[in-house]
Every structure is written in C-alpha cells, then in structure tokens.
Amino acid sequence: MIKVLIVDDIPETRDHLSRFLGLEREIDVAGTAGSGEEAIQLSMDLRPDVIVMDINMPVLDGIATAEIIAQRLPTSPIIMMSVHGEAEHLKRAMLAGAREFLVKPFSGDEFATSIKRVHERELVRRQQLQVAPGATQASSPAAVESTEDHQVLAVFSPKGGAGVTTLATNLALALRRETNQRVALVDANLQFGDIGVLLNLNPKNKSVLDAVEGGEPDRDIIESVMVDHSTGIRVLLAPPSPEGADLVTPAFLRKIVDMLRETHDWVVVDLPSGLNDHTLGVLDAADQVLVVGALEITTIKNVRLFLEVADQLDYDRSKIRLVINRSDASQGIRIGDVEASIRRTIDGTIVSDGRLAVLAVNRGVPFVISHPESPLARDVIKLARTLAGEGVASTQSIDKAAKRGLFARR
Ligand SMILES: Nc1ncnc2c1ncn2[C@@H]1O[C@H](COP(=O)(O)OP(=O)(O)OP(=O)(O)O)[C@@H](O)[C@H]1O
Ligand SMILES: [Mg+2]
C-alpha cells in the first residue's frame, strides 16, 4: 500500500481528492492536512510514501512547506498541484524539491498514476542511495562508487536541423525525471550552441571556455564550470560566441566527457551534425549513440552512410540507437520503409508538434517539464525509458557475459 498525505486548504478539494483515491487498491489516504504547518506535523508523524500538496495556501504556502518537508523527510516525495501550469510556478516547485507537478483540473486516473509513478521512482532512488525508508537525513551515496553503469549518451544526426538539440535537452530532463539520477548535459555545438537558450540560462554563466582557460581539465575546474539547472540536471554550456570554439580541442572535449562520466550517471551530449575530430571523439567515448533521423530521403541516405562509418569504426551494433523525429509528418515514407532501407529496427519515434516545440524554445522551458502529458513529451519520456531501462540492461548483461567468457568474441 502507498501511504498518501493530501494537503490542501480547501476542505472540498481534500474530500474530492480522497474520493479519487478511494477506489485505488494500492493507495491508502493516510491523512489530510488543511495548512502547511499541519502538513509538516502530520508528515513527521505519518511518514507518508507520497505527499500531494496544493501550491496556493495561506500563511505557509506549498513551496515553503515543500522546502521544509523535502529537507526533513527526503524519503517522502512531494507532488505539487496548481491551477496554473506556469513556468514560474513549475520552476519554483521543482526548486523546492517537488518531484512532479499536476495542473488542476486532472482526472482520478492521472492523479493515481502520478502517485504510483512518483512512489516507484522513489523506491528506485532509495535503492540507489541505500537510504533506509523513513530516514530523516539523506545519507551520502556509498563512498566507493563503481562507474561501470554510468552512460555517455551522444545524440547525433548526419543531417542538420533533425532535432538533435531538442531531443538531447528533453531527454536529459526525462532521464532525470524517470531515474532521479545525476544527469549532465553537454552542449558540444561549440560554435552555435543553443542549450543555454532552450533552458533559459543566463548568458553570463560559465561555459566550457572557462575550463579551457584553466589549462588541463581536472575535476575541480570542470565542477566549477557546470551550471545547475532548476530541474536538477547540470549543464556544460558552449562558448558564448563562435570564435571561442577554436580554443576547445577535440582531445579537450573528449577528456571533459570522460571526466563527467565519472561523476554522473548520465552524460548527454548534444552534437553538431558534421563528422569531424570533435564529434568522432565524443562518439568514441559514448556508451550509446542516439542517431536522429526523419522520414525524408536525404536524411535516410545520410543515416545509412553514417551506419557504414560506425561499422568501419568497429562500433558495437547495440551501441547505435535510432529514433525518427516528426515521425507522423511523413510524405509517403513509412517507418517500415526506413527499417528495410537501413536494415535495422527503429528504437523510437517522436511525433511532430511544431507549435509546442517552438513555444518551449521561446519560453525557455523544455516541453518535458512544461507539458509532460503532451504526445511529444510522452514520446521523449518513452525513449528515455528505453535508453535507461532495457538499453542499459541489455548492453550490461552482454558486457558481463562477455567478461565471463560466454560470448567470446572471435
Ligand atoms: N518533434 C518535433 N516537432 C516539431 N518541431 C520540432 C520537433 N523536433 C524539433 N523541432 C524543431 O525543429 C527545429 C530544429 O530543431 P533542433 O535545433 O533541435 O535541431 P538540430 O538537429 O539540433 O539542428 P542543428 O543541426 O542546427 O544543430 C527547431 O525549431 C525545433 O523546435
Ligand atoms: Mg542543434
């Protein structure tokens, strides 16, 4: 049973939400609170598995309450509810430690699903942190950490404008959301990096250029140039102007990616479309390469050429994953045609939604955060699950088997 605490200052809403969950067999409404103060007291007493809280409450509002609870009870995840889906609300809720954001009105189904999802993710997180349930302080992760299952995910397309930056950014956020692990996002478009804009980061922030000025990259220097985003991911920005790109050598970029891999579970790299020493270095370093294609002949031709290069480079076939962006906007080409043409299966598809994609860029809030229920975001979240879940499991088990000599190669 998932023990839930409902916090809302309006009694009817509390009743309404409790009734929503009345039919759910796995969920038990352990208590309801009408104010922030009451919520803090009750959560310490009940130690709920999930807390659902309204953002707008008199005196101590949802944000302030969430901040206090997230500190005292890090093992009780909070879902924030609001009538507005505004970016500012969202950001503040996430900063305060909320794990999900629900915009009212929502259905009973959405409500229960969100609770179950947050609970499940919390269980995974606890396992990773080895925190005892109900612990009042988040204990630090195991001192000696294996980096074997850390992943560098390079996102690449042999054709410009395919949606690499859009996918890399939203995937990084989706991975964070789904796994709660440490995610770094690297803007490797050294001349014209867009990630700062997509995430609405201050252009005065540090960039990879500041690491170059420090000489040889070392852990402290790289740490000092990573920018924290409100969602919990960490970003390495491209130089603020194109001429800065020349100062970042391929070896330097590669070294940075390798070093970030030591301290992050995921390093997502947004690559420019050409094959050069910079991109090749990152592709070599990557555990998975996500190739972004489209239902368009020239792109498919280039994807096929890239796959040939990957073969020549001796990349393991399982290292390359394929996704078709704007997969529903085809003019006569079907997924099956592409699969036949490149003789590989597609790992994921992303629907076309120009309105939402552009809105997200212009507002500086990626759609995975602002519209997680949209078909576009759902496709990206699904892809993130594929890459995190079965992707990791299958490559890992193959690696392990290889080490045991079961699949001796040649
Ligand atoms: N699924 C989608 N539906 C609609 N529009 C999309 C989708 N994915 C990306 N776009 C839009 O396509 C344009 C190009 O996307 P993006 O910048 O991510 O591509 P890119 O591959 O990184 O390009 P570049 O080669 O310039 O680096 C952007 O305007 C973006 O909003
Ligand atoms: Mg790009």
Image: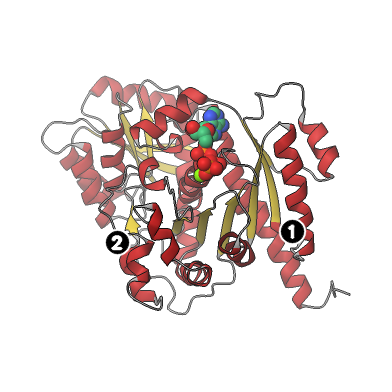
Q: Residue furthest right?
A: 410
Secondary element type, mark 2: loop
The quarter of the displayed image where residue 106 is located: top left
The x and y percentages for residue 135 are: 34, 62
Q: Label 1: few (<14), some or many (≥20) within 10 Å?
A: some
Direction from residue 60 to residue 373 in the image, left or right:
right
Tell which circle, 2 or 1, labels the residue nearer the N-terminal end.
2
Q: Residues within 10 Å of mark 2 (few under 14, many from 20)?
A: some
Q: Which residue is mark 2?
A: 136
Report whether the residue tagged 1 is closer than 8 Å to ligand 1. no
Outermost residue toward the left in this view: 59
Which dot, 2 or 1, sits closer to the camera?
1
Camera sees residue 167: no
In front of the other: 181 or 123: 181
Residue drawn at point x = 58 percent, y = 35 percent: 379
For image coordinates 48% across by 52% down, the residue present is 189
Which coloring applies here? secondary structure
Mark identifier at residue 201 = none
Q: Is residue 62 above or below residue 129?
A: above
Q: Residue at x 73, y 51 (%)?
A: 306
Amino acid tagged 1: Ala
Horizontal side of 259 relative to 83 (left or right) equals right
Residue at coordinates 84% horizontally, 39% vertically from top-left? 341
Classify 99 as above or below 267.
Answer: above
Q: Is residue 124 left or right of residue 98?
A: right
- Residue type at mark 2: give it: Thr
Q: Which residue is mark 1?
A: 310
Q: Secondary structure at mark 1?
A: helix
Instruction: Report whether residue 390 is seen.
Output: yes
Q: Position of residue 11 (x, y in %)?
A: 24, 23
